[in-house]
Image (cartoon, coloured by chain):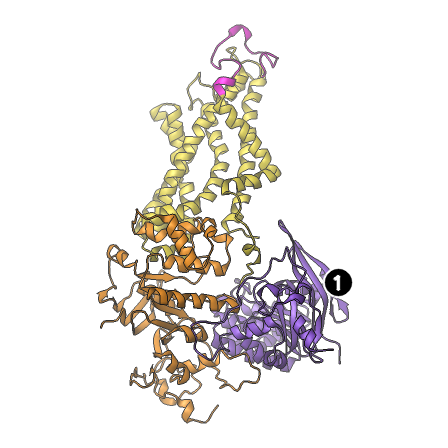
Chain colours: A yellow, B orange, C purple
């Protein structure tokens, strides 16, 4: 018999989201992560309005300058303002990351729940599918597709999405399997709930937590992947700015000006740190809730 | 008059996973149970671990498949009924589960949980808020509980929510799996009183599954004692308690003594542990633990004896303790 | 009267929680006389888990001892170091817990575990093995030698609990603390284990602190009983006195609610309506007052302990008035 003393005296707490936010803000790493991510997202959304210059406007006479008051991060080999390109590059990065991960989560959730809750033969088929896709080395696969279809933003998104699906799918599958035999699922079955209803109403909300955490940690990976492909020239087409292409330009011009590399590298590092801190803090907050307010 | 629920020689088997090379075996969790429950009646199934009582309950509600036998509700055969047809009956046959908080979907509010039956049955025009309030009031919980979540309420309160949910659509048969397990003694009575009150009000038949014989004494009309998947004694509650026929029933009675240090009790101690279902004893399956075992018990299988004046039993030497010297 | 094996005096323990200070134990005094079995009866929230964690010095990080002493073998457990405590645990003080499924290390054989805990003894491995095998037979496990090679998952719950008791008693402790050891087991198994425990206690001559909510078992096994409610001791005495002449309204109500006690069939079973009070915001009066059928004005004040005879104590205003002592 457990002691229910605390519970009996507890009043209804605030909504779940604000509860998560409350705890996140109190964790120092979480706070840092939240701030960084907030900045990046903000600048990505409002990029067209906050860039000091048009990122693709060339201005040859001012090329390859160092940082100054008029050009905060200097200019590149075509005289374009690096700072503006960095901000726009952030937008591109998120434009790739969000649909990619969003798509991977959606498909991964659906396939994972079906695999975990459905009949064994279906589970075997889906797991085979997952394992096959996962066996491709991601970058090679991406390069192969790009070589066939040609580089573009959409290609990058599609490739990364498809290769991310198994990761989420597997986690959802395992979680679903562990929930499948819980007493509350049995109770819903005894009430006559259809398989679809059980998956949608009872399993889905319980697997979203860990997935959200995974996603937060994955965003920097996807951004890095996009940057890598763009660095190799296989990603977004110029003149669209991307942190990866900034790095490439900077690599070629390293003897002339180091600022391009710095401008391309720092945002990547910051983004990775920011999302990772956020993801870790999120996991710490979400986990005890999954256990039902474990003490 | 046909009974509300008629169970005829039901068997529920589980096959065991085989290794790569070894063959699979199977165990009979329920191995031939027959009983009847009338409308408005309360029937208690008592047994300990491995008795198959929970499996029987789940077979009735279609959560497990009965491999053999027949389960008839108001004459309609439930065994093998496709889920589409069964769903219609789920308004009338409901179940309450043992783990009060674990049987509530953790991310749904209490209000959503108790109105699930309405949504599942597609009753779109119901005022769900009003129904939630009505159900909460029925089990003695305040309105504001509708907005709470399972992790915010106590075990006793969660049990009441389980009752509210089960009774949402006015069922005719409620199967309660260990309704008082884990509850403090001082509030066990509350749960049983609530069930009794609701039964009177709604004309409900209740099947109570429990390992605690004392709980069953007050609220049931009939009692069935299960051991290793079979009924070993069955009859009116009064008879079973005052004149038990099977040694296992006697042992169960002795195991729940009243708190009196000077009480003169028949100190019955069963030998050893319940045998594994993989290795059922020969002859009378209870003989390995029976304190009154006779040599014939080891190879003769006792028949089910239903003579009438006392409870029915499965024993070759019923009430043997009355005839032998007191141990 | 010889010194008690365990003497708890005025123990108060609180937990710090986001809502405030949760006063889990308040001025609890319990004595366990030499070679006796003392039972603690109480329901959820009575503080028995906190009590055990205080005695074994395995308290949660947010728990603080506000006052009191726990005297064992002439030293105060609350004042000794963790190192000294770990020397006591498993030798002089043994514990048996409620959940037999989680007591043992699943990846080591039982024999290995039973030999391991004898690490302080200077015996050969063979001798330790034999001791283990003897102990298993004593708790009623047949073919002990063979079974020592098996792993915990090969034993049922009842058997695991017996093994736990065997391991606890192997070192011949002065005090065995058993926290609801039979709650998770079937009643017929409980009967066996209680009997075995009684026999072993007789042989080994230890004292036992036995926690349970099963009144029938306490009446059967224990010599003395302490009734706790919401962090306080409300009544204590010999099992005979407390169960035959319960003095505290809570004890009386508890006995009335016990299913084994109710002989007449009824559709309206007795209960104790209400809930235990909020241990963070306690009132100054008697802790049971809100739920007591005999509540009156005097109950606004905390009752003192009065004694009904040399052993039987109760904290209730009613008794205080009846007995001029």
**Most common SS among magenta residues:** loop
> What residue appears at the point 39 percent right and 42 percent down from the top-left corner?
A109
The residue carrying pointer 1 sits among few (fewer than 14), some (14 to 19) or many (20 or more) residues within 10 Å by Cα, namely: few
Residue C66 at what x, y percent from top left?
Answer: 72, 59
Left or right, A56 with respect to C46, comes to: left
> What residue appears at the point 34 percent right and 87 percent down from the top-left corner?
B316
Q: Nearer the viewer, residue B238 or A133?
A: B238
Residue corresponding to mark 1: C80
Magenta segment boundaries in residue numbering: A47-72
> What residue appears at the point 42 percent right and 45 percent down from the top-left corner?
A205
Which quadrant: the N terminus of chain B? bottom left
Q: Is residue B100 visible?
A: no
Q: Up-down: is C203 above or below A260?
A: below
Q: Nearer the viewer, residue C21 or A87?
A: C21
Residue at the far front in the pictured view = C297
- Residue A70 colored magenta? yes
Callout 1: SS: loop
Q: Nearer the viewer, residue C257 or B108?
A: C257
Q: Nearer the viewer, residue C94 or C124?
A: C94
Residue at the far right in the pictured view = C74
- Residue B130 colored magenta? no
Can you tell which quarter of the image residue B138 is in? Answer: bottom left
């Amino acid at each position: 018999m457990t002691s229910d003393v605390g519970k009996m005296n507890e009043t209804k707490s605030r909504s779940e989201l604000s509860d998560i936010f409350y705890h996140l803000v109190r964790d120092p790493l979480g706070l840092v992560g939240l701030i960084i991510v907030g900045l990046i997202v903000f600048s990505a959304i409002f990029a067209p309005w906050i860039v000091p210059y048009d990122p693709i406007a060339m201005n040859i006479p001012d090329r390859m300058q160092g940082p100054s008051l008029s050009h905060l991060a200097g200019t590149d080999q075509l005289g374009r303002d690096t700072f503006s390109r960095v901000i726009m590059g952030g937008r591109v990065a998120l434009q790739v990351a969000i649909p990619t991960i969003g798509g991977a989560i959606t498909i991964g959730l659906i396939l994972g729940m079906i695999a975990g809750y459905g009949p064994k033969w279906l589970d075997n088929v889906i797991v085979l599918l997952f394992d096959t896709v996962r066996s491709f080395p991601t970058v090679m696969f991406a390069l192969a597709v790009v070589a066939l279809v040609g580089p573009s933003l959409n290609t990058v998104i599609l490739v990364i999405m498809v290769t991310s699906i198994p990761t989420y799918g597997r986690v959802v599958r395992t979680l679903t399997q562990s929930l499948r035999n819980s007493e509350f699922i049995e109770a819903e079955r005894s009430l006559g709930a259809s398989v679809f209803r059980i998956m949608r109403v009872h399993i889905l909300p319980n697997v979203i937590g860990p997935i959200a955490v995974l996603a937060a940690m994955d965003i920097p990976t996807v951004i890095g992947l996009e940057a890598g492909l763009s660095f190799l020239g296989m990603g977004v087409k110029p003149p669209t700015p991307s942190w990866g292409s900034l790095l490439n330009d900077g690599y070629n011009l390293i003897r002339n000006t180091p600022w391009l590399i710095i401008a391309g590298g720092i945002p990547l590092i910051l983004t990775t740190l920011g999302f990772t801190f956020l993801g870790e803090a999120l996991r710490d907050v979400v986990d005890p809730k999954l256990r039902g307010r474990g003490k | 008059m046909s009974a509300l629920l008629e169970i005829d020689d039901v068997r529920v088997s589980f096959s065991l996973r085989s290794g790569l090379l070894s063959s699979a075996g199977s165990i009979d969790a329920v191995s031939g149970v027959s009983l009847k429950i009338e409308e408005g009646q309360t029937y208690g199934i008592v047994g300990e671990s491995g008795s198959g009582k929970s499996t029987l309950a789940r077979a009735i509600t279609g959560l497990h498949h009965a491999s053999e036998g027949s389960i008839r509700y108001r004459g309609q055969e439930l065994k093998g009924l496709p889920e589409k047809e069964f769903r219609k009956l789920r308004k009338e046959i409901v179940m309450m589960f043992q783990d009060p908080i674990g049987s509530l979907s953790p991310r749904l509010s209490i209000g959503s949980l108790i109105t699930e039956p309405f949504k599942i049955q597609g009753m779109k025009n119901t005022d769900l808020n009003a129904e939630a309030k009505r159900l909460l009031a029925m089990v003695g919980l305040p309105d504001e509980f509708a907005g709470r979540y399972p992790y915010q309420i106590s075990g006793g309160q969660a049990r009441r929510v389980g009752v509210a949910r089960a009774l949402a659509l006015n069922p005719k048969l409620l199967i309660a799996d260990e309704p008082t397990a884990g509850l403090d003694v001082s509030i066990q009575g509350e749960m049983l009183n609530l069930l009794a009150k609701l039964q009177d009000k709604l004309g409900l038949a209740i099947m109570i599954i429990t390992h605690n014989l004392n709980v069953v004494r007050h609220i049931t009309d009939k009692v069935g004692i299960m051991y290793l998947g079979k009924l070993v004694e069955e009859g009116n509650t009064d008879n079973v308690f005052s004149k038990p026929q099977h040694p296992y029933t006697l042992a169960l009675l002795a195991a729940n003594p009243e708190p009196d240090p000077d009480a003169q009790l028949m100190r019955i101690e069963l030998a050893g542990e319940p045998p594994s279902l993989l290795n059922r004893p020969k002859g009378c399956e209870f003989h390995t633990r029976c304190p009154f075992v006779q040599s014939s018990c080891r190879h003769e299988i006792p028949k089910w004896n239903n003579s009438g004046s006392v409870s029915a039993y499965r024993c070759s030497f019923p009430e043997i303790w009355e005839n032998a010297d007191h141990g | 009267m010889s010194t008690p094996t365990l003497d708890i005096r005025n123990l108060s323990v609180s937990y710090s929680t986001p809502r405030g200070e949760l006063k889990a134990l308040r001025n609890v005094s319990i004595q366990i006389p030499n070679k006796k079995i003392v039972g603690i009866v109480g329901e959820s929230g009575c503080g028995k888990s906190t009590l055990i964690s205080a005695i074994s010095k395995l308290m949660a990080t947010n728990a603080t001892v506000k006052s009191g002493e726990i005297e064992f073998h002439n030293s105060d457990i609350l004042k000794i170091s963790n190192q000294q405590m770990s020397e006591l645990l498993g030798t002089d003080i043994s514990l048996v817990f409620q959940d037999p499924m989680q007591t043992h290390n699943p990846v080591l054989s039982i024999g290995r575990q039973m030999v391991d805990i004898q690490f302080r003894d200077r015996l050969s491995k063979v001798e330790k093995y034999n001791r283990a095998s003897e102990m298993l037979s004593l708790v009623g496990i047949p073919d002990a030698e063979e079974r020592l090679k098996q792993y915990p998952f090969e034993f049922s719950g009842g058997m695991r609990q017996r093994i736990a008791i065997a391991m606890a008693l192997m070192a011949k402790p002065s005090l065995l603390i058993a926290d609801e050891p039979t709650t998770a087991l079937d009643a017929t198994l409980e009967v066996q284990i209680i009997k075995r425990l009684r026999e072993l206690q007789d042989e080994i001559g230890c004292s036992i602190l036995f926690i349970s909510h099963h009144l029938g078992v306490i009446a059967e096994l224990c010599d003395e009983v302490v009734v706790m409610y919401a962090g306080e001791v409300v009544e204590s005495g010999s099992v005979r006195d407390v169960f035959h002449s319960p003095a505290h309204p809570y004890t009386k109500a508890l006995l009335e609610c016990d299913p084994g006690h109710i002989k007449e069939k009824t559709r309206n079973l007795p209960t104790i309506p209400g809930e235990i009070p909020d241990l963070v915001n306690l009132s100054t009066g008697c802790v049971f007052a809100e739920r007591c059928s005999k509540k009156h004005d005097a109950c606004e004040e905390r009752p003192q302990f009065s004694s009904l005879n040399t052993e039987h104590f109760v904290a209730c205003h009613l008794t205080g008035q009846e007995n001029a002592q």
